[in-house]
Each structure stands twice: as structure tokens, then as C-alpha cells.
Amino acid sequence: MAATSDATVDPTDGATRRDAVEWRPSRGKVGVASLIAMESFFFGTFIVAFLFYIGKDVHGPTGATALDVGPVIVWSICLLSSSATVVAAVKALARGAKAAFEFWMGATLLLGGAFVYGTAVEWRGLMLDHELFISTNLFGSTYYGLVGFHAFHVVLGLLALGMIWTLSKLGHLRAVDAEKVELVSWYWHFVDVVWIFVFTSVYLFGTGIL
Amino acid sequence: MTTLPTTPAETVADRRAEPLSARLHLWAITVDHKRLGIMYVLSGLVFFLVGGLEASAMRAQLARPGNDLVSPEVFNQLFTMHGTTMVFLVGMPVLLGMGNYLIPLMIGARDMAFPRLNAFGFWLFLFGGLLLYYSYIGAQGLYGTSAAPDVGWFAYAPLTDRTFSRGNSTDYWILGIMVSGFGSIATGANLVATILCMRCRGMTLMRMPLMAWMMLVVGVLVLTALGPLTAAQVMLLFDRNLGAHFFDPQEGGSAILWQHFFWFFGHPEVYILILPAFGFVSEIVPTFSRKVIFGYPLMVAATVGIGFISLSVWAHHMFAVGLGPVLDAFFSAMTFMIAVPTGIKIFNWIGTMWGGRIRFASPMLFATGFVAMFVIGGLTGIMLAMVPFDWQVSDSYFVVGHFHYVLFGGTIFAIFGALHYWYPKAVGRMLNETIAKWSFWLLFAGFNLTFFPMHISGLLGMPRRIYTFQPDRGLELWNLLSTAGVPLQAAGVLLIVWNLLRSHRKGAIAGNDPWDAWTLEWATTSPPPEHNFDEPPTVGSRRPLWDLKHPEDPDGRYE
Ligand SMILES: [Cu+2]
């Protein structure tokens, strides 16, 4: 009965199949998808806390009085467009175009960096002009908790993308690594999608615009 | 059809020849799923003994009314550490560890999908557990107050507020659980990736052993449940250490929100703890009934159904809060609904035993004990799903009795059954069957003696988490009976430990397939070589070893 490893008898029809390798999903993709699923629930919890506490503060400042949506829209456009540049980078790597890859990856890093800078500027204004800290009130706790964890994930993503960019500059990145880079780009897309939810909660619902 | 490797047995003597330090070093640096699985189970068993000691101290305190064996403060620490230990440092690691050991073997893989992540997860769990227990030494901090965490295993706000919980004990609770939680998340993702991506040729999803299906759903539940727990713990950490107000009612924060967050994790957690047990039983019952599992596709559907429904029943832990009739009715109805797929499983196990040639070897004893005890726990669970009944007995010993029938009579019995079933595979030697039977019956008698009277004392009004009780309320007898069961259980557990230790050297040689079983892990040697199978196996049915032993009548045609 022991068939050899490259020819097996299919018990359903008795036919001999030669090395019919069955399809299995890529473990890297499943692993990153699992991480993203877990992180979605993590962020979902912070978003629920933010939405639940809108209007429950016993004193200000609140989102309606302290947040300025205008600049945030600019920084958001930076972050969201970096999803497009990272796609361009992955495609360039897959076809072996090293220079194009480094250009688009560099653009992604700059756009992501601009977003983090925007967050820093906003926080500086909130702390100096509005005296809003994490311990000030519920809005401070939920705002810094949610936006802070998002910014933290952006920084993690930038570190990962930055390492890839550096590896490419040092000549250690080849076209066969495209799937790994694509997996990091999945994470980057995830961070962008989370921002859409954070923006809607904090800057639209939290300010009273919606 | 089924191809099986022939592996030269790795001689035990070879390994014993190396010096102890070299062997320990191998364990410390290993990324092998089998070694990691064994380390998970062993550390889980050590924590089980510690958690059992804590429980014994509580039962000794409650043996008679007005006892003063331990102070109220120490009692609070005992029930907090007992619950936290049993859930996070015994249930999760032992079950995930057994999944770790068995899943790659069962699906014919070389290892888990991410071996190094696997090792990382184990060490996070172990050091998270040690961090929690370090609180006994370190948590006095600057304040000189409470040593170990004393806020209960679900750490309700505002008890956990700085105002009410001075010192650092609650921070140790948060950080210890969070660190070991990261380990569980890593293992959950690893299980999902392993089961989806690493199956050998011919191992379609619907040919996997049922345990692999259960572990797949457990992996998904770990990913969905531990994210919210981690987020809520981070908020609590911010409250306590950065002055945030997430759960601070004085600043408009909500103590109820913590309950929602915690139980959104807490109820799926119950299924994380019971689904692997279902998996063990679904492997043991067919082998010892000499029949295929009854209703395989229905078992798969029930498992996936439980996974989904378990995400929307959490507020049945919060009926006493006063959520209002709409929410109460919704969560009550969902809780009744989850009893349906669970009941299907019970009937399928009974259907598998029905008309079978049952062999009551020790694994089967524990498995049938599991089915009986779990049914009792499930039925009291349905009672508790009725909102008015829950209002009456919430936070009483009735609830304590209920969940111990589920998690001890259920999960722990199934774990012991699994230990007796797969020990020969992992060690290469059989456990002593006489000792095993003594330990089962001692444990079974002691368990029922301790936990059945709790239903009655709970109905009579004995509140849980209370360090003493008044005489003349009719509670003395039931509490005394509960305490009287402890020595029997302790004897049963110690016999199991002794059996595990002595059989390691003295047990009869097991051979590859001592139970005449049908799943892939029995095809390789006992213990399996580091690479599991010399050649990647190929399977043609759900019972590859049946096909191999009965080439004239392979299973594939009937599936
Ligand atoms: Cu529940």
C-alpha cells in the first residue's frame, strides 16, 4: 500500500496521480491576516470607548472645543495616499525595478513621516493651548489613547518600511522577497484603514460635525 | 492511499548520555513544537498545583463558620490568584500546548507554521506567569500594602482604581496577564496558519481530525478575544499610572464599560478553554468505542457555530447589573442558542459510543467522566441563562459550582484524559493503568463531593468570594462537604503526577500505536523524531491508519 512520495493512488477514483501538489494558502499571508484581525479588535475596543464617552465629560476641553479638523484633513490625505505609493513600490519590486521601488518606498516613508509630524504638531497645540492631557478628562484619556495607539502603529509601520528601504539601498533585497514586502504593505494598508475609522470617530463624531 | 514513513527509533539512551546542562540547553533554545508543547504542559501542571494549593487553603478556611485560618485580605488574594492562575496559566497554556504538540503530527506537518514565533509565545507565557507571581514579593512597592492582586480574576472597576487598590498588585495582574496574553495571541495565529497552510497531501479540511477543527476555531477565538482584553488592560494601566479616567466614575467614566470589555473577552475565553477539550474527547471516544465519530460534518458545523455565537453572549455575566429588558432578553436568548450546537456534540459522542465495543482504559474513563460532568455544568448554565433565576443566584456558590463543573469536570477531566491518551506518544512509555484508574475515581469522587454541594449552599444564599459565613444559616454541612472533597481530589492529582513521573522511567514500552488508533500521530515512532515523519505522509481519508491496517476496505469510499 505504501506508495512512493511522487505517485499516489487516489482512493476516490483509483487513479494514479503524479505529484499533484495540493494548494495551500501562504502561511505568511495567513499569519499577517491573523495579526490584522487581532489588531482590528484591539482598535475597535478603543474606538468603542471613545464613542461611548462623547459628551460624558464633567468638564472641558472636549473634541468640539479643542480639535481643529482643517490641518488633520491635510495630514490624512498624506497617510491615505501612502497606501497608493506602497502599492506602486511592491509592484516595482515584483518586476525587479530597483530604482522605481526605492523611489516609491521613499515616497511612502515621507508621506507617513508627514502624518506623524502632523500628529506631533496637533498634540503640541492641544497640550500648550488647551491644556489637554491624558489625565485632564475623559476626552483627554480616550483621545490620546486612540490617536496615540494609531500613531504608535504608524511609527512601527514606518520602522518596518524603513528597514526594507535600507536593505534595498544596501543591495540585500531581491525580487523573490516581493511577497514579504507585500505582507508589510498589508500591515501598512491596515494602519491606513484604521485611520479612516479613527478620523470618523474623533474628528467627525467627536467634534459634533456628524 | 496512505503512505507511511518508517522511522528508525531514536534511542532514549543516546539522549541520556549527554550531560544535564547540555540537555537543558537544548530545551531552552528549542523551536521544536513537540518540546515546546511538553514545556507548556509541564509548566501548566506546576501552575495547576499552585492554583490547587490556593483553592485548598480557601476550602480549609471555609470548612466551618467563623474560621480564622486566613485573614480576609489573604482570602481575597487567594481567590484572585486561584482564578487568574487556573484560567491564564493552566487552562490556556496546557490546551494550547497540547495543540502545539499534536496538531502538526495530526495533519502530517514537519512543525508549526512559525516555529520561532512558537518558542517566543511559550517564553512570553512562562515569564508572564512568573511576573504575576512575583507580585507576592514585589507588589508592596512604596505603600507597604497588599502583596498579591486581590481584585478578583475579572478585576471589576472601580475596585482596581488607585483609590481602592493601593500599591502595585493590580499592575502586576495587568502586566502578567498582558505578557502571557501576547504569547497566547502568537500561538493562536500560529495554530490558524499551521492548520490552514501546513496540512500534508490529501489532508483536506474535511479529512482533518476533529481536534484540528476545534483548534482552528480556538485560534480564531484567541485572536478575537485577546485584542479587546489587551486594550481594556492598557486603559486600566493608563488609569492607574497616567491618571486617565477610562473607568473612573468620578470623572464620568463607566465601571460598566470595563465589565463589557472584560466579558467580551471572558465569554469567548470559556470556549477557548472548552473547545480543545471537546477536541480531545472527539479523538478519544472513537478510538475506545472502536467506531468512527458519529456525525463528523455536524461536529464541524457545531464547532464553527459555537465560535460565532460565543462572540455575542457576553452580557449573560452582567444580568445583575441592570442592563434593561431588551439587552437582557437578547443575551439570554443567545445563551440558550449556544446550548444547541453544544448539545449536538454531546449527542454525537453518545452516538459514537452507542453500540461500540467500548474499552474503559484510563483515557476513556476520563472522557466519559468529562461528558457526564460537562452535561451537569451545561444544564446549570442553561438555568443561569434565565434572567430571573440569574438575579437570584448571581455571585453565589451556585455559580461557582456551575463553572467548576464546566472547567474542572469538563476541561480538566478532558486534559487528564488527553494526558493519559497521548503520554505514550510523547514519552514512548505507557502510564500505569492501575494508578490511572485509582486517580480517576479519587478525582471523580472528590470533585463531586466538593462541587455538588456548592449548588445547594448557593441556593441557600452562600455568596461567593466571602472569607467566612455565619453559623445557623444552614450552610455548615454543605461547606464542610465541599471541604471534605479536597483531600480526595488532592490524592487523585498527586497520583497522576506520580504516575507521570514514574512511568517516564518504568512504564512499559508503548510502541507506535498502543491504542490501535487511526489518526496520523500514531503512524510515527513514540516519541516522534524531531522531523516527525521521514517522508511527508499522504492521506486518503479521515482515518489514515485504518486505511493502512485494512487496505481491502479503505475509509475513503464511505466519506
Ligand atoms: Cu459566559
Image: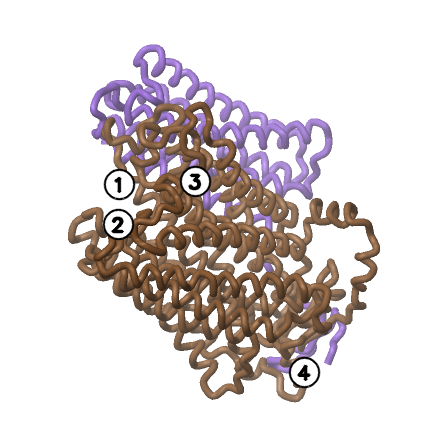
Q: Are marks 2 and 3 on the same chain?
A: yes
Instruction: Look at label 2 and name its amino acid.
Output: Met
Q: CA distance from mark 1 to mark 2?
A: 9 Å
Instruction: Look at label 4 and name its amino acid.
Output: Lys
Judge: label 2 CB < 8 Å from ligand 1. no
Say which label, 1 or 3, has the lower sequence index: 3
For the colour brown, the matching chain is B
Give the residue pinned by disc 4: B549
| Mark 1 and mark 2 residues within 8 Å of each other at the beta carbon | yes
Under tag 2, what secondary structure? Answer: loop
Say which label, 4 or 2, has the lower sequence index: 2
Q: CA distance from mark 3 to mark 4?
A: 49 Å
Q: CA distance from mark 1 to mark 3?
A: 17 Å
Label 2 environment density (alpha carbons within 10 Å; few <14, some 14–19, many ≥20): some
Name of the residue lying farthest toward the left: B325
Name of the residue lying farthest toward the top: A128
Q: Is residue A103 above or below residue B355?
A: above
| Mark 4 and mark 1 residues within 8 Å of each other at the beta carbon | no
Give the residue pinned by disc 3: B230
Give the residue pinned by disc 1: B256
Where the N terminus of chain B falls, by quadrant? bottom right
